[in-house]
Amino acid sequence: MTTVAFRAKRPMNYEMFRPYHERLRRDPAMRVFLYGKAAGRSDTSVFDKAGALPATRRPNWMVKFTAPDLLYSADFLLPTRRAKASIQIFHGVSIKNYFLNERIHDYDHVFATGPYMIRRYVERGFFEAGDPKLRHVGLPKTDRLTDGTLDRARFLEAQGLDPALPTVLYAPSWGDESSLDRMGEALLRALAGFDGNVLVKLHDNAYDPRYAQRDWRALLDELAGPRFAAPDVSDVIPFMQASDLMVTDISSVAFEWLQVDRPLVFMTFPDQLRRWEGKADLDTWGRRIGVECDDPAALLGTVDDELAHADRKGDVRREACADIYFHVGCSTDAAMEETYAILGRTPPAGVVRGAAAGA
């Protein structure tokens, strides 16, 4: 029996692991353990919030006394030194270049999202070119954006929205550099005036009283209506697949959005990236993949213009997507191939569907 551990402190952490978990369950020789914490305390409720797949759940403190065969982590702060093999799977790539973190060396294997990540690691001296620790995987979380498994109309109808209308998604980052904290109420009220559907997907921390500036759920409930929905769920992928345009700031969802190849608006303000000075990269792709807006009052005009010229940034978006991601739509296959290579085993039938090798 091969034991697999995953640790999470937010529901979004588990969403990065969910595609792995779903495939690993098909192998009777794999046993998955989920170790959780919530609000700074060891607590498995994080997996209830995420609607996690069946597995043995344990509080986070217990992982210190285990030695799993494999540890997957989407957070740099959650390694397990006793694991026989540890794998960093990341929670996305963004303008911030948060992945340029010395804690990457706490992991035995790096499931790189794409050529861009590997190039930046080499340029900054984290790894030598060709280092076998850097494995070409992609981002399994985003496979459903393009693999045909999601139904846009069904999702929108489930939120009480009309699928015949254009849909705008607001999905900001969190903290001082986020548009939510800087201009959130004005921005949300402006979006509520859009002549179409509005979906809102906030970061997990926006609902955490330790980090949130205010009770955002109360405001979202006030704005909710037949054209405005903000369901309290952790998985952003159905929101993205169902939307025609996204509004964000410096969140990693901006780069994930490249896989649907649709218009993007960045909310900006002075010194937004001050905390990430020295890591942030605006020169390679940055905000070139969308347009900028610094005033909530001007947002709807920007949105309307981008929807009317949806392919204006199309060439840049497609070039960026090819650089940022390996195996678009089939990266879970690549992840399973690499996982079983690490274990020195051949994946059983159904664990790898075979598309990644030619992607």
Image: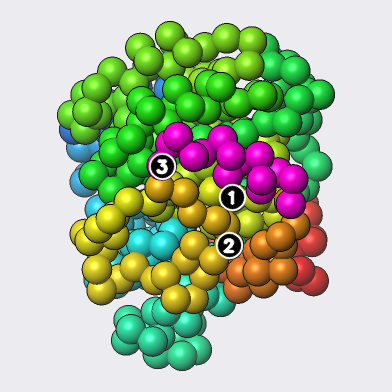
**Callout in the foreground (3, 2):** 3
Task: Quickly name the residue at label 1.
Answer: 264
Comparing 141 with 181, the one in front is 181
- At which x and y percent is residue 215? 28, 18
Look at the image and tell me whether residue 347 can be seen. no
C-alpha gap between disc 1 and disc 3: 15 Å
Q: Callout 2: helix, strand or loop? A: loop
- Residue 106: which disc? none
Ranked by sequence position, the earlier of labels 3 and 2 is: 2
Horizontal side of 268 relative to 166 (left or right) equals: left
Estimate how packed mark 1 is, as few (under 14), some (14 to 19) or many (20 or more) residues with alpha carbons within 10 Å: many
C-alpha gap between disc 3 and disc 2: 19 Å
Task: Quickly name the residue at label 3.
Answer: 295
Q: Magenta span covers which residues?
A: 295-309
Q: In the rendered structure, are the residues bearing label 2 and label 1 in contact, judged by CB atoms less than 8 Å apart?
A: yes
Identity, as a three-letter code, of the amino acid under mark 2: Ile
- Work out whether 125 lies above or below 204: below
170 in magenta: no
Identity, as a three-letter code, of the amino acid under mark 3: Asp
- Residue 289: which disc? 2
